[in-house]
Image (spheres, rainbow, N blue to C red):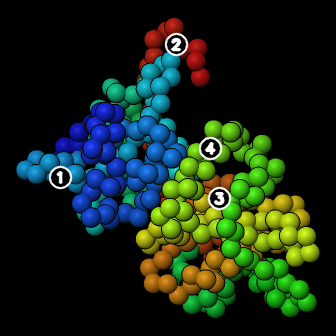
Amino acid sequence: MPHAPVSSAALFGTRPACLGCLRGRGAQPVPYAHSWWLRATAGRWEALVQIEPETGRYLSVWPLPTKWRPGGRQVYQPPFTQQLGLVSCAESAPTIGPEVTQLTQRYARFYTQLNEANGLPAAPSQFAVETRQTYQLDLSPAYEILRADYCADYRRRLLRHEAAAAPLIVIELPDTEPLLALFQQTKGPAAGLRPRHYARLRRLLAELQSRQLLEARAVRQPETGTLLAGALFVRYRSRLIYLFAAASDEGKKAAAPLLLLDDTIRRHAGTPGLVLDFEGGMLPAIARFFANFGAAPVPYAALSFTSQRPWYLQWMP
């Protein structure tokens, strides 16, 4: 069945083209494709949809967050949104077909990260396909089995920590603002995040909390209560997503990030079918950190193109 583009007006009408349009739920565990996630992180989006001609029912949806620039309408990957791509009701992996060529006529610039179920598509020549990777850990086994797969250094650090007279404790973080402030003080400048990005993150966290999908954990300095490190996780169906984290220099020295992830693995170990998605791994140092917990790389694709612009716009980046 053909995919048909949906206008922005239809997206913001009574039947928005998003994961919620599929009867039941999409077979792929992609929380990023929900309208409430897209409203928080992108604000505006269009979509390709596959429609059943007899009923008008949506069979698949491909959200396309958009923004306007002087060169024309662009599709981009919003912040805090690892994967989008084609999401369908079918249990089989949804494939990107030749109908994507119509996108080159609609958008001036296009960049989107597909979901892992889409595989690495054989895209038309106008498109560039980049292989990306995330790291994932199956949490079905018991904690003792999972911990045995940690690297030797992590196991030693945990043993020393557990033998300490006053070990650090991982606790629930009821208010996420101190964690955002810690990130701004540490990683924020290098990450290039601006006030608008933090505003989007706050909107997203409010949506997640209202749906009871957010887990916020922290490690504090026992004597002063100073936040050493914190992490935010999204629990969505068969995925536990490592969404956001920050640590101070003191927290890193105390191995607080290690304690946060070990605590999460311990609490969720033995859950059949649950997968911890570390939501990253493109940087070698970050990839090693995740692999040291026994996580394995999982590929997904990024699809992009830039249309030929008029001569008077070619100076633009």
| Residue that lies at the very extreme toward the left in this rendered image | 54
Q: Residue at x 47, y 25 (%)?
A: 68
Instruction: Give coordinates of residue 55: x percent, y percent.
Output: 10, 51
Q: Is residue 1 above or below residue 170?
A: above
How many other residues sit within 10 Å of disc 2, few (<14), some (14-19) or many (≥20)?
A: few
Give me the C-alpha separation between circle 2 and circle 3.
37 Å
Residue at point 28%, 37% (across, down): 10
Asked if residue 225 lies left or right of residue 191, the reply is right
Which residue is the site of mark 2? Answer: 313
- Which of the two labelled residues, at mark 4 and mark 1, occupies the earlier sequence position? 1
What residue is drawn where x is 39% and y is 32%?
Answer: 126
Disc 1, disc 2: CB below 8 Å? no
Give the quadrant of residue 290: bottom right
Residues under labels 4 and 1: Cα distance? 35 Å
Eye-nearest disc, 4 or 3: 4
Q: Is residue 311 above or below residue 114?
A: above
What percent of the width, then of the height, locates residue 26?
A: 32, 61
- The correct choice, above or below, for 268 with respect to 174 in the image is below
Q: Earlier in the sequence, mark 4 or mark 3?
A: 4
Residue behind mark 1: 57
| Residue at 44% across, 51% down | 36
Q: Are marks 4 and 3 in contact (CB under 8 Å)?
A: no
Disc 4 secondary structure class: helix
Judging by the rendered image, the residue that carries numbered circle 3 is 244
